[in-house]
């Protein structure tokens, strides 16, 4: 028919150039007309999806979607063409072998520019268009109708609206949907090639979860039989409401909420409190203050081989004290492991406690004149438990001796001669020191002592 029309146009044109121009315009006009009016449309469809196959026009046919929620509805299709035409409507027969469109139309409408059908059920539909005065159809159009059944989405809860205890685990929580969430699909065929097999269109459902005041996050769907498990792989440490929302590709949305009562133990530890002076010199007493949540048992591991445990049968303190004696350059790792009534375990990040190596330094002068400055001869020590010290005159007479295991309480030599209590004369004095640390066996000499040396006494 196109060839006859083009030939007629060329005969009525006086020149080949003008005829060629009008030929191009006619082709463009015809193509535009097909694009504009040669498509099946559906009024009030909730969505549409292109088929996977390509039709004879090089386009993809359309799957029109009609949601059955909140109320059931039927489909409709319309087709408009230029001029008066006869429209014949055919249904797709899924039960044929092979499946194909029925041989006879279920309705024929003559001498109109547009044809519409309503109350259509799910399935495929074909419309042929025969211009007035012609016998054979000029065009054929196909569309598919999908009656979207929607889905059910209700969380399984106990009588208090909470997650049932047997769906709560230490490493995850399963939010269960019953009855089954529908992942609906739709089957269709390539017109004229149905023997090659069916195509499947799946209506994807997206699930998002929100815990507390956090933002929504997508979640995976774990299918086990007829029960759907929406899984949270990081259960919170406190009671938390959860909000779930599910929606498909065409606007159907469902939501539900549930309360999660935590079974996860948790504990926060304040910054360890160390001594104000010499905080890393042994012995190092440390105070740990902590706040537990949902805990039934505590096990403190101090990193030096010592540990302490508390449980619900004992009065659990809110502070724990421990003393570190033995020097360790790399420090001690203190951890607290807590256990809940459900036997879930949480272990804190290690706290590092440093204890310095033994060290001793002796000044070469002191002035015992009661001015409050340098009035005592006292070596500076780190991580030493005690020592022996002998002080002699230049002539070798001993003027002072001390031995003790509590250097922090020892004030030092005040410059008086032992026994007599008289002030020692100014001059040079000599000392010998033997020191030991807090380790076992004790460090007799932290720097390969005994120490020997001299110092000046001035008044």
Image (cartoon, helix red, strand yellow):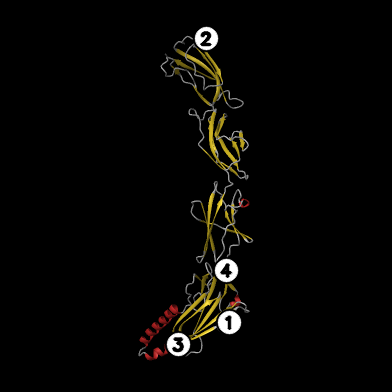
Q: How far, Cα to Cα, is label 2 from label 3?
A: 137 Å
Q: How far, Cα to Cα, is label 4 from label 2?
A: 105 Å
According to the image, label 2 marks what residue? 419
Of badges 1 and 2, the one in the foreground is: 1
According to the image, label 3 marks what residue? 3
Of badges 2 and 3, the one in the foreground is: 2
Q: Tell me, yes or no, whether the two marked residues, 1 and 2, touch with CB atoms within 8 Å.
A: no
Q: Of the numbered discs in the image, which one, if any, rests on residue 185?
A: 4
**Which badge, 4 or 2, comes first in the chain's sequence?**
4
Residue 82 placement, left or right of 126: left
Q: Is residue 449 visible?
A: no
Q: Nearer the viewer, residue 69 or 439?
A: 69
Q: Callout 4: 10 Å neighbours few (<14), some, many (20+)? A: few
Residue 245 coordinates in the image, percent (x, y) = 52, 59
Residue at far front of view: 159
Query: Which image quadrant for residue 31?
Result: bottom left
Of badges 3 and 4, the one in the foreground is: 4
At 55% from the left and 81% from the top, the residue drawn is 90
Circle 3: element type = helix
According to the image, label 1 marks what residue? 102
Q: Of the numbered discs in the image, which one, if any, rests on residue 38?
A: none
């Amino acid at each position: 028919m196109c060839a006859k029309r083009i030939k007629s146009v060329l005969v009525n044109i006086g020149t080949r150039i003008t005829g060629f121009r009008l030929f191009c315009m006619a082709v463009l006009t015809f193509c535009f007309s097909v694009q504009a009016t040669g498509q099946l449309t559906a009024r009030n469809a909730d969505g549409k999806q292109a088929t996977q196959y390509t039709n004879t026009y090089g386009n993809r046919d359309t799957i029109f979607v009609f949601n059955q929620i909140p109320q059931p509805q039927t489909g409709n299709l319309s087709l408009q063409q230029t001029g008066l035409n006869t429209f014949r409507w055919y249904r797709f027969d899924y039960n044929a072998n092979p499946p194909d469109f029925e041989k006879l139309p279920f309705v024929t409408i003559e001498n109109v520019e547009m044809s519409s059908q309503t109350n259509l059920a799910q399935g495929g539909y074909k419309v042929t268009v025969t211009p007035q005065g012609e016998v054979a159809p000029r065009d054929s159009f196909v569309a598919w109708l999908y009656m979207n059944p929607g889905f059910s989405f209700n969380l399984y809860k106990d009588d208090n609206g909470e997650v049932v205890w047997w769906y709560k685990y230490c490493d995850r929580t399963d939010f269960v949907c019953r009855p089954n969430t529908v992942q609906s699909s739709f089957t269709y065929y390539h017109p004229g090639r149905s023997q090659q097999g069916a195509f499947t269109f799946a209506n994807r459902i997206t699930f998002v979860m929100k815990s507390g005041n956090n933002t929504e996050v997508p979640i995976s769907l774990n299918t086990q039989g007829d029960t759907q498990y929406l899984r949270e792989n990081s259960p919170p440490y406190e009671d938390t409401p959860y909000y779930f929302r599910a929606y498909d590709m065409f606007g159907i949305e469902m939501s539900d909420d549930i309360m999660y009562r935590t079974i996860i133990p948790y504990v926060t530890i304040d910054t360890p409190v160390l001594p104000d002076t010499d905080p890393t010199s042994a012995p190092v007493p440390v105070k740990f203050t902590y706040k537990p949540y949902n805990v039934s048992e505590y096990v403190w591991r101090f990193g030096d081989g010592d540990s302490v445990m508390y449980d619900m049968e004992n009065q659990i303190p809110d502070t724990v004290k421990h003393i570190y004696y033995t020097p360790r350059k790399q420090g001690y790792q203190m951890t607290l492991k807590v256990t809940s009534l459900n036997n879930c375990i949480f272990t804190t990040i290690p706290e590092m406690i440093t204890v310095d190596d033994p060290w001793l330094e002796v000044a070469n002068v002191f002035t015992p004149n009661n001015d409050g400055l340098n009035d005592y001869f006292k070596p500076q020590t780190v991580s030493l438990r005690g020592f022996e010290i002998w002080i002699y005159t230049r002539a070798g007479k001993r003027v002072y001796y001390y031995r003790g295991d509590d250097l922090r309480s020892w004030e030092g030599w005040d410059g008086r001669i032992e026994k007599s209590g008289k002030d020692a004369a100014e001059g040079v004095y000599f000392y010998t020191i033997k020191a030991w640390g807090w380790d076992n066996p004790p460090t007799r000499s932290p720097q390969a002592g005994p120490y020997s040396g001299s110092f000046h006494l001035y008044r």
